[in-house]
Amino acid sequence: MSDCQSRTIWWDDGLWLIDETLLPEELLALEIKSIHQLVQAIKSLQVRGAPALGAAGAYGIALAAHLSRAAGAPEMMAELETAAEMIRSARPTAVNLSWGVDRVMRAAACGESREEIREKALAEAEEIAAEDIRVNRLLGKFGARLLRDGDNVLTHCNAGRLACVGWGTALGVVRSAVAEGKKIHVYACETRPLHQGSRLTAWELSQDGIPVTLICDSMSGSLMRMGRIDKVIVGADRITKDAVFNKIGTYSHAVLARHHGIPFYVAAPLSTFDPGHEEADITVEERDPEEICMLNGKRLAPQGIEAYNPAFDATPLELVSGIITEKGVFRPPLMPLL
């Protein structure tokens, strides 16, 4: 479990991940022992963030192969397909989850025996995990060029190393700029209702010694009007041909940034792009309304009140100043060729 300090998800004679629901109070490595447990971990946000979900999906297929007691290779592949369907459906808006599952399934299908299937599945999952860190560091290098010494950066939700295997996307850009010697200050939106900004982003940045100020989600416009925000950088869970899907509240920040003439950037690997679909095609995950009505077991709203709790919103590409990827920065409508 030595990877606990540097990676969010890893393989050590089994699948391990950081339980993000316990942060910032406790840093715990959780062993995943079944596909059902993995699906629940994804749904409950013990593991979250587009790139981390890609790795989770990949390792999930490797875990299914590791656990399989199928009589032969065809029977094992049938078991893996069942596991793949379970994992894909855990969070439908996150395209990286299906991407990771499908990539390992293709590798496993090249195996001619049960042992070959296991080996190929695990090797591909490990490559996806290692690739994620390489990609994020490249992405960070390109994104750092957009930041000036002394910039104040607004971010929403958590697009740091906890949302990836390591380094991070939006926060990876900040880390890369700091590594170059630039002084960067981050305003982290708390990100209601599950507080990924206050629990995760603020924790990550404080661990790294990067100055961070926690704010309410509704405060960003006021700070922009006062001239205290220089750039906005967020992550993404899916990028279609016309919109960026990210944590609910992202669209509001984009509209406010456009009004105040502030650059609004999205940091995401190419695996998050879904050019074959547009906004109208995508199912947006709706979570339990009680997440809005409760906080740490205490009721915040009247019993029986109606609540609406979508996990994501869509930001039209015309509001995006640039998309930071491992291949460089693309300014819509210019998009990378996949």
Image (spheres, rainbow, N blue to C red):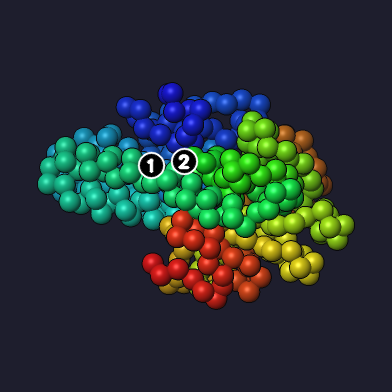
Instruction: Looking at the picture, tell me which residue is in the foreground, 177 or 126.
Output: 177
Q: Quadrant of residue 37?
A: top left
Whether 102 is drawn above or below 181: the answer is: below
**What is the x, y in percent for residue 187?**
74, 47
Label 1 crowd (10 A; few <14 / some 14-19 / many >=20): some
Q: Residue 130 carries which label?
A: 1
Residue at 63% x, 41% y is 181
Residue at 63% x, 74% y is 318
The amino acid marked with disc number 2 is Val
Residue at 69% x, 64% y is 263
Position of 200 compared to 34: left or right? right
Whether 62 is drawn above or below 90: the answer is: above
In the rendered structure, which disc, 2 or 1, sits on the residue that comes first in sequence? Answer: 1
Instruction: Looking at the picture, tell me which residue is in the foreground, 129 or 47.
Output: 129
Q: Can residue 310 be seen in this view?
A: no
- Quadrant location of the N terminus in the rendered image: top left
- Quadrant location of the C terminus in the rendered image: bottom left
Position of 104 compared to 283: left or right? left
The amino acid marked with disc number 1 is Ala
Residues under numbered marks 2 and 1 in contact, where contact means CB atoms less than 8 Å apart: yes
Separation of marks 2 and 1 at Cα, in angstroms: 8 Å
Q: Can residue 68 be seen in this view?
A: yes
Q: Mark 2 — residue? A: 165
Residue at 48% x, 46% y is 137
Whether 167 is drawn above or below 221: the answer is: above
Helix, strand or loop at label 1? It is: helix
Helix, strand or loop at label 2? It is: loop
